[in-house]
Image (cartoon, rainbow, N blue to C red):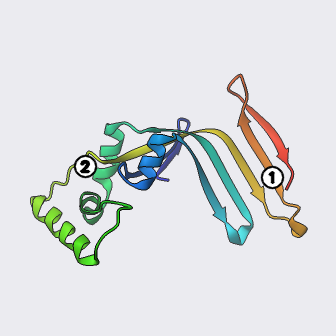
Amino acid sequence: MKAAGEDGFVFFTNYESRKGGELAENPRAALVFLWQPLGRQVRIEGTVARASEEESAAYFAARAPGSRIGAWASPQSSVLGSRDELETRVADAEERFADGEVPLPPHWGGFRLTPDAVEFWQHRDNRLHDRLRYRRGPDGGWVVERLAP
């Protein structure tokens, strides 16, 4: 996750990756944040839509040069024949963008998850954990529910 705000949670990926393809087919997802040492977890569920090209381009421009090259070179989630194949793709991308300007690839960008439900989990002994779920009610407000562990 790279951004969070009133309009949702934003993350970036290759649209042609496994994740990108699955989100195109079923635009629902969950984000899970686990803090094992604290015994806490937050799960956020909701609908997903592509972020604007402007937002994707702004984030892409802020990435390290090697990460920008990697976005062009890596066919994310695809099977590679060897490490050499990836390194050749990187070298080709570095040559292509030798002038230093690495534009946003058409196959890369952001997704925004708009939450429908947020669950807070707190570890307790004997597996009697605390679980509170906030879910969108019919009026758009949040309904708070205690869930059994």
Q: How many marks?
A: 2
Q: How crowded is the residue under tag 2: few (<14 C-alpha within 10 Å), some, or many (20+)?
A: some
The amino acid type found where label 1 is placed reads: Arg
Picture layout, residue 19 above or below residue 113: below
The amino acid type found where label 2 is placed reads: Pro
- In this rendering, position of residue 124 left or right of residue 109: right
- In this rendering, position of residue 125 left or right of residue 24: right
Task: Out of 86 and 37, give the one closest to the viewer.
Answer: 86
Q: Which residue is mark 1?
A: 131
Residue 28: image location, x then y, percent: 56, 41
**From this viewpoint, which residue is outermost toward the top?**
139
The residue under the point 25% across, 48% down is 104
Q: Earlier in the sequence, mark 2 or mark 1?
A: 2
Per the image, label 2 sits on a secondary structure element best described as loop
- In this rendering, position of residue 136 left or right of residue 101: right
Q: How crowded is the residue under tag 1: few (<14 C-alpha within 10 Å), some, or many (20+)?
A: some
Per the image, label 1 sits on a secondary structure element best described as strand
Alpha-carbon span between mark 2 and mark 1:
41 Å
Q: Which mark is residue 86?
A: none
Picture layout, residue 61 above or below residue 28: below
The residue under the point 42% across, 48% down is 21
The residue under the point 82% across, 41% down is 145
Picture layout, residue 107 above or below residue 85: above
| Marks 2 & 1, CB-CB < 8 Å contact | no
Q: Which residue is mark 2?
A: 105
Q: Quadrant of residue 5?
A: top right
Residue 61: image location, x then y, percent: 28, 51
Q: Quadrant of residue 144?
A: top right
Residue 59: image location, x then y, percent: 35, 49
Is the C terminus in the top left, top right, bottom left or bottom right quadrant? bottom right
